[in-house]
Image (tube, grey):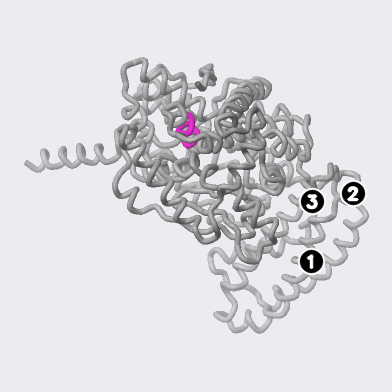
Amino acid sequence: MKKNITTLILIVSCMFISNASELIDVINTYSADKRALEGTYSVRESEEYYSRFFTFYERYQKELKAIDFKALSTEGKADYVLLNNEIKREIYQLKNNYKAYKDVAHVADFATPLYTFIKERRRGKQPDSKTLAGYFNSIKNTIAAKTEALKKTPFENWIVADKASRVISSLQRSLKEAFEFYYKYDPEFTWWVKDAYAELDDALKLYRSFLTENYSENSIKDDGSGIIGKPVGRDALVKDLEFEFIPYSPEELIATAEKQFDWCKEEMIKASKEMGFGTDWKAALEHVKDTYVEPGKQPQAIKDLYDHSVKFIEDRDLITIPDLAKETWGMIMMTPERQKVNPFFTGGWEISISYPTVDMSYEDKMMSMRGNNPNFSFPTVQHELHPGHNLQYFMNNRHKSYRRVFSTPFWMEGWALYWEIVLWNKDFAQTPEQKMGMLFWRIHRCARIIFSLKYQLGEWTPQQCIDMLVNEVGHEYANAEAEVRRSFATSYTPPLYQLAYMTGGLQFYALRNEMLAKGWTEKQFHDRVMQENMMPIEILRSVIQDLPIKKDAKTNWKFSTDFK
């Protein structure tokens, strides 16, 4: 009887983890170990951090090699390939980051006593407070001399200067944590170190700010936009595409985007004619921008659009949206500061609504309202909520959650964009204004591929990217500038992020068509995707089609780029 109960418990457990593969414990342990190390080695820009993580990844590479790949199920082989790919990507990025660190590590060559203090604090060793205060005072003076010396040898460009600044900010954060661990709890430490730490912290703040700006003026290539980035180059793009299992070159992706761009423009002209503007699609777009709602009414407009889209999807039985998911999504208002780099609403667990606040200028208020009118929002509320990002987060927490470590924008953003394609084909848009709103975002995603890749290849400047968004897509200037700034002058978006929307959407669309040809319903396909969690879509294809998976799998799925 006891044996039968144990067997039943095991069966029920397997049901709850949705047929998790044999590697679930390996992947969970990998993720947990990584989080533990990141919490311990808090000085991210230090020799200790890089050394420890090289050792960490090498250890897991050895563990993977010891696994009998041939004996694994299809799910297990997929997870093996995914983890191996993730580790290789992490090592590749760590090596690049370490090389950049080594080039600027000298900016903290005075900090050995500080690193020792931080390291010993982890195990609560009582410091020699008088000696530590002396170190702090001495290092404060050293920083002043170091600053004067570095003024004579500015860094090559702002990228290097930023890295140098992060060496100091990383040190400063951990030093603060270590100081606060002892401060007031240890009377002797507090008496000796309080003032010395405050003076050192001020010196580090000034030093960090100096490093940020200490780069050669000749390296500044401001094309008038005020946006200064650094293209990564073709080799880096190709390497990143390999990690994402995308078999196309940057040039091929640009050509695909240009083809889609032309299709969108033709459809915009059709909608323009329906509105009575003839072939003047820009005039029609300006008309649509003026359909904005008054201040204070945007949240209700978003809720109405959400209700409409969910009803449309559920009436056609396209996907399962759990009642709890519909019950628990939320909304917040986006801050004015965030709107400077993200002029449109975003989503995830909640939808973040971008709309003007009372202290914005008249021009900024109008651009925000016009850029977030209900017709522009018509195709994107479901992108952010259901069946887009909110449903993705909801389901990822409930199905094979161990795979979250394999996060990729081609899955996350591609899935949300895929639904815009599907809904367009199902005549979701009924009025020409709604069609124009859907097409505006569709052509925007095409433009993202074109301008981001041409910039990263060194072919376009930021101003050319802005001009394209304004003249060829129809953005308000401030919104176009914010979009380009977010793409190239912040850490928000890695080089492939902007092209992941449409490219990932096309991958999902191609996979959908393959599955429908095999007799699946759309709902079967959509629900299965939500049960597999995140991964490159080519690997997802192998899983749901039970295709052979090689141990050294490389991208080879030339997915169709036909989007109609």
Q: Nearer the viewer, residue 392 or 42?
A: 392
State the image quarter where residue 404 is shown.
Answer: top left
| Residue 419 belongs to the span the image colors magenta | yes
* Figure check: 246 above or below 397: above
Q: Is residue 542 visible?
A: yes
Q: Residue 431: where, in percent of width, then height?
A: 48, 35
* Figure check: 430 above or below 328: above
Instruction: Tell me the CA gap for discs 3 and 1.
Output: 14 Å
Determine whether label 2 and label 1 are within 8 Å by CB: no
Left/right of residue 92 with respect to residue 156 in the rendered view:
left
Instruction: Tell me the CA gap for discs 2 and 3.
Output: 12 Å
Left/right of residue 338 with respect to residue 84 in the rendered view:
right
Q: Earlier in the sequence, mark 2 or mark 1?
A: 1
Q: Residue 163: where, in percent of width, then height?
A: 74, 50
| Residue 40 belongs to the span the image colors magenta | no
Determine whether label 2 and label 3 are within 8 Å by CB: no
The residue labelled by disc 1 is: 206
State the image quarter where residue 15 is shown.
Answer: top left
Q: Which residues are magenta?
A: 415-421
Q: Is residue 83 visible?
A: no
Is disc 1 placed on a helix, strand or loop?
helix
The residue at 71%/46% (across/down) is: 477
* Figure check: 448 above or below 163: above
Label 1: how many Cα within 10 Å (few below 14, some 14–19, many 20+) = some
Q: Amino acid at mark 2?
A: Glu
Which numbered marker is on residue 217?
A: 2
State the image quarter where residue 58 is shown.
Answer: top right
The residue labelled by disc 3 is: 161
Instruction: Tell me the CA gap for discs 2 and 1.
Output: 20 Å
